[in-house]
Image (cartoon, helix red, strand yellow):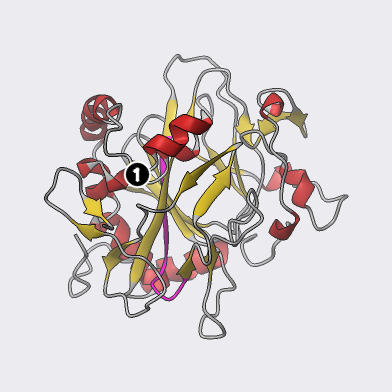
Amino acid sequence: MTQDIGTRQFALTPEELDQFQKNGFYGPFKVYEVDEMRQIWRRERLALMDRSNAIYQEEAAQSGNTNISNYDRHMDSDFLADHICRPEIVEKVSSVLGPDVLCWRTEFFPKYPGDEGTDWHQADTFANASGSPQIVWAGDEHVHFGGTLTVWAAFTEANLDTGCLQFMPGTHQSMMYDETKKMHYDPNRINREAKNGVQRGFFGYDYRELQIDEDFEPDESLAVPMVMRPGEAIMFWSTLMHASLPHNGTTDEMRLGFATRYVPTSVHVYPDTEEIVEYGGKVSLDRFGSVVVSGVNEYPYNRIATQTTTGHPFTTR
């Protein structure tokens, strides 16, 4: 599934790359046709109910948690395994990160009628919930200071009614949050609080706990909505200030986003970490592995998942 970088039909042009570096995001861009995506999702939402090969199945069931249990379903879903390697995505990602690229995490982001929006936030090392860095960039060889390149794909309509993403362009080079402070999980916070006049939260966390400046308030006037049709995606630095609107309930259709996280192969993924501890639960990384989606991996410290023919796309065994 690794992309051949010899042909780059979907790579960013120099002008597009300049705009990406300035704004911190690119898109939306088409990955699937609208009707194609709708047909795919009708099929795949049923297939994903089978968790027999999900790599976090047992631990997630014990914790009663649904957030981390649905991380990394590309490891057992043929469709998602293909999705993370789509040339429409990977060629754009490698335009920014270089030829050697890992996918180190995928996540579903469902939003149902009445669900709150997501807090304005930035993510650099992804230590915000556990207190332990989940990605660490190599020393001085990279100009960018950290974060991951996220490609957020709309599997359903993502608009002002269903709770689309919002960005603050150009905010990706300066962190307003200190992830080493660690947030405190409280599920009673969910759907309970308005911030700057908008009902927002962070899945039981409060990003204000990480603010470097306690008086900092995100400037809502800078917010740009990212309206997307099914099958479209957007690429952005995780360090870009981003949030989402609430689902206002004017339609009974859920909004579903699927986020794929990419880094150069030189980035150390889950250093000195044996489990993910988030959202009041934990999952073991025993079966986890990053997927090389472009180029090659020449670094010994990351566990790499390989393709298999034993009923699920990747294995680290």
Provide the major secondary structure of the magenta segment. strand
Q: Residue 208 falls in which quadrant of the image?
A: top right
User: Residue at (58%, 56%) from the top-left corner?
Assistant: 126
- In the rendered view, tell whether residue 86 sits above or below residue 267: above
**Which residue is nearer to you in this view: 116 or 269?**
269
Q: Residue 198 falls in which quadrant of the image?
A: top right
| Residue 176 picture location, percent across and down | 74, 58
| Residue 19 picture location, percent across and down | 49, 65
Name the secondary structure under disc 1: loop
Which contiguous range is marked in magenta?
A: 257-267
The N terminus lies in quadrant = bottom left
- In the rendered view, tell whether residue 207 sits above or below residue 88: above
* 48 on left or right of 7: right
Q: Does the magenta stretch include residue 168?
A: no
Q: Is residue 77 visible?
A: yes
The C terminus lies in quadrant = bottom left
Q: Residue 191 falls in which quadrant of the image?
A: top right
User: Residue at (15%, 43%) from the top-left corner?
Assistant: 311
Name the residue type under label 1.
Ile
* 42 on left or right of 174: left
**Which residue is nearer to you in this view: 221 or 187?**
187
User: Residue at (32%, 64%) from the top-left corner?
Assistant: 304
| Residue 294 picture location, percent across and down | 27, 68
User: Residue at (78%, 46%) from the top-left corner?
Assistant: 209
| Residue 151 picture location, percent across and down | 41, 52
- In the rendered view, tell whether residue 9 sits above or below residue 39: below
What residue does disc 1 label?
Answer: 55
